[in-house]
Amino acid sequence: MIMRLAQSLGYEVVEVDDGDGTLAVGGHDGASALRVGWRPLIVEGYTGSGSIDRFAIRTRDARHRESLRDMRERLRGPDRDADPVALAAPILRLLQPGAYGVRRWPDANVHIEPFGENRSAWWYPYEAIGTEGTAVIPTDHWPPLDDATVGEYADEIRRGRRPLAVLLRSEPPGDEQDCAAFLIDGHHKLAAYRRTDTAPHFLDIARLADRRPCEPEDLRAVIGGDGKLEQSAANLMQYLEHAGR
């Protein structure tokens, strides 16, 4: 079923046999975790508050984000190659073994959900303004700090180039109006698309696996004992614990 969904959305299915697992996404959309260096960086899911609001929580440990910045140097590569699997090769080598879908996603419809001071981001799917399409969860500063680099990409976009930012998600989007993806590379590119009022282009990678939520330990790790976040995430935690029995 998930393979057919991926193919219907334009993903090319590829089997990763030799990935080292230093970059991993687990769970299903609405209860997924991004892990970097075998440690949870971000967990996203539904609050379970009786509404349809969703949230994401990021670890307080800055070393995780620094590890991802170092890893981005391994993600650099030409974005003019027409073959999305070839473009994704440096990323696929970092993922845990398994099946993935890879596609170019041009003119994407997304909204960006940055983290606040309490390490959380909140949004409501299906709202008429501001949250149409896929929720993109940044893994680094948003907006990005280097405005000069944003300006350089903006100039390229105005000249007709379409550089690819990179998304990693736990599964193909069953409902594009209510799904989330992690932005693992291309924060400056995405900011440049917004600056030029141009729909962004992505290299989009989706894990293809049985539809199970992430582990409750992932959520505990990113909460890190914060009482307010524990309260906010209580319903999601209950769901994760029940699913793991």
Image (spheres, rainbow, N blue to C red):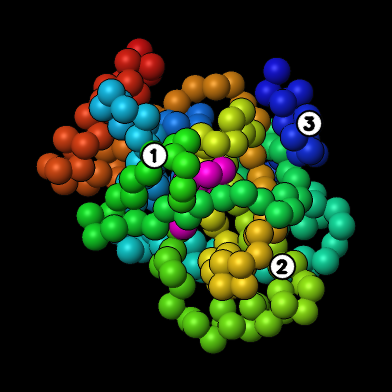
For the stretch drawn in magenta, what is the main secondary structure? strand
Q: Is residue 132 magenta?
A: yes
Does label 3 or label 1 sit earlier along the sequence? 3
Look at the image and tell me whether residue 36 can be seen: no
Residue at image location 53% in from the left, 44% down from the top: 132
Q: Residues within 10 Å of mark 2 (few under 14, many from 20)?
A: many
Residue type of the residue flagged with mark 2: Pro
Q: Position of residue 22 (x, y in %)?
A: 53, 51
Q: Are marks 3 and 2 in contact (CB under 8 Å)?
A: no
**Cβ–Cβ under 8 Å for marks 3 and 1:** no
Name the residue beneath numbered marker 3.
7
Label number found at residue 171? none
In three-dimensional space, the C-alpha distance between marks 2 and 1, rounded to whole angstroms, equals 29 Å
Image point (22%, 55%), residue name: 118
* Disc 1: CA contacts within 10 A as few (<14), some (14-19) or many (>=20): some
Viewed as shown, does residue 118 lie left or right of 143? left
Tell me the magenta residue range: 131-138
The quadrant of the picture occupied by the N terminus is: top right
Which residue is farthest left? Answer: 227
Viewer-closest of 188 and 106:
106
Residue 42 percent across, percent down from the top left: 39, 47
- Residue receiving disc 1: 124
Query: What amino acid type is highlighted by mark number 1?
Result: Tyr
Residue 68 visible somewhere in the drawing: yes
Q: Classify mark 1: helix, strand or loop.
A: loop
Hey, which residue is sitting farthest right in the picture? Answer: 82
Q: Earlier in the sequence, mark 2 or mark 1?
A: 1
Q: Which residue is mark 2?
A: 163
